[in-house]
Image (cartoon, helix red, strand yellow):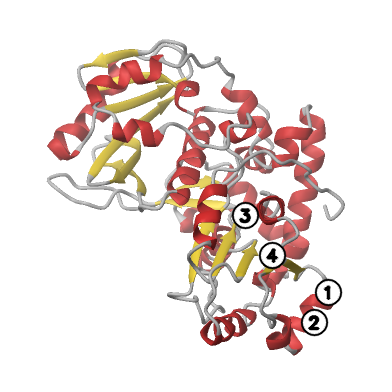
Amino acid sequence: MDNIHVMNTLPRLVGEALASRLRVMPAVVVTGARQTGKSTLAAHLIGDARRYLSLDDLDVLDAARRDPEVLVGGSGPITLDEVQREPDLLLAVKRAIDRDRVAGRFLLTGSANLLLMRQVSESLAGRASYLTLWPMTRREQRGEGRCGRWEELLSTADAEWHGLFATPAEPEDDWRAFARRGGYPTPALELTTDPDRAIWFDGYVRTYLERDLQALASISGLPDFRRLMRAAALRVGQLLNQTELGRDVALPQPTVHRWLHLLETSYQLVRLPAYAIHRTKRLIKSPKVYWADVGLAMHLADVSDPTGSHLENLILCDLLAWRDARLERAELGYWRTSIGEEVDFVVEAGGQLLPIEVKATTRPRLSDATHLRAFRAEYGKKARAGLLLHAGAELQWLAPDVLAVPWWRVL
């Protein structure tokens, strides 16, 4: 994996947000899974204006441990890559900022969520802005540097949604091919066959288990950990029951809990919370499990034909990229009642609730809108019209308050 370098300069969704934050904050932290393109993004935006040091370099890592003050010293801007390998380095960054607060001085990148790492004692509160670089969205892969049309959707009146998605004309796409290639730049952009991608994904998993994971925690039972990864990959879109998962892979529940946390910290696993505001119905509160990259999830599960749950996962990946690139915070969740009513995704932004249902069918029917309408009845005026994303080609109102849209017109 060390010899694989993705040489692409396609614009990324977070590029503008990164440049804006560097103009304001003394430190900007860009995190995401390895091979999502963090280093490429930093080099493309900054060029040769910054000093660049990577803690993947053993000499740099040794210096970070022995004399971090010298490593981060100097007056010029500096990029520090893979900072999760030495979390105490952030203390030196904090002290350097407190001595000389200059906008854009530090650009820190890492393959772990520093805010979830228990050994990180300093979050650079008030000194840093955080961005997440997720695997490439479909529109990033097409060179557009953006995600799906969520912002347009929220800013457009419900009655005008049909016209919004009718124009401009979008080329029809095969979601199954999208799922197989995933969003990591190399398999998505450079590799054209499933066997070639399988080779890449296998190398990625081996590197993750043997190097990246060990930088976060000491894991002696790597075969057990890989078995847990496969079991989680087979549960895409399902409620997460750690006791049941542990029973299936013959691991104690505390171990399952700790290892799932590591998968989440390293941006492999995504736990989608239940929408929490209770009104009149009893709600299911367990999270649902998804993966940050559908291609990797299919490889881990040894699945060649994607299912409807993988289409759900593709939609969620795009929503995550959108959520984490915008300045105003948005919340994502799912809605499920004890009597079985369920909406795949609920977007909460600007005081609005946008319910989204995903169906792999090519011919959506009125019955597919039942749970969206139940959600709207429950939350009243706060809820926008329901959005049903499907695998077909028809754009139509299934009901006065539910619009069926081909997935590729949104993503």
Question: 130 or 45: which is nearer to us?
Answer: 45
Q: Earlier in the sequence, mark 2 or mark 4?
A: 2
Considering the numbered disc 4 on the image, is that residue within a helix, a strand or a loop?
A: helix
Whole-angstrom CA distance, mark 1 to mark 4, is 17 Å
Residue located 82% across and 40% down the image: 199
Q: Which mark is residue 58?
A: 1
Q: CA distance from mark 3 to mark 4?
A: 14 Å
Q: Is residue 13 left or right of residue 9?
A: left
Q: CA distance from mark 3 to mark 1?
A: 30 Å
Q: Work out whether mark 3 precedes mark 1 in sequence or the reverse, and give the earlier one.
A: 1
Label 1: element kind: helix
Q: Which residue is mark 2?
A: 62
- In this rendering, the label closer to the viewer, 3 or 4: 4
Given the image, on which type of amino acid does mark 4 rest?
Leu
Q: Which residue is mark 4?
A: 213
Q: Which mark is residue 113?
A: none
Q: Which residue is mark 3?
A: 228
Q: Earlier in the sequence, mark 1 or mark 4?
A: 1
Separation of marks 2 and 3 at Cα, in angstroms: 33 Å
> Are the residues at dot 3 and dot 1 in contact (C-beta closer than 8 Å)?
no
What amino acid type is highlighted by mark number 2? Answer: Asp
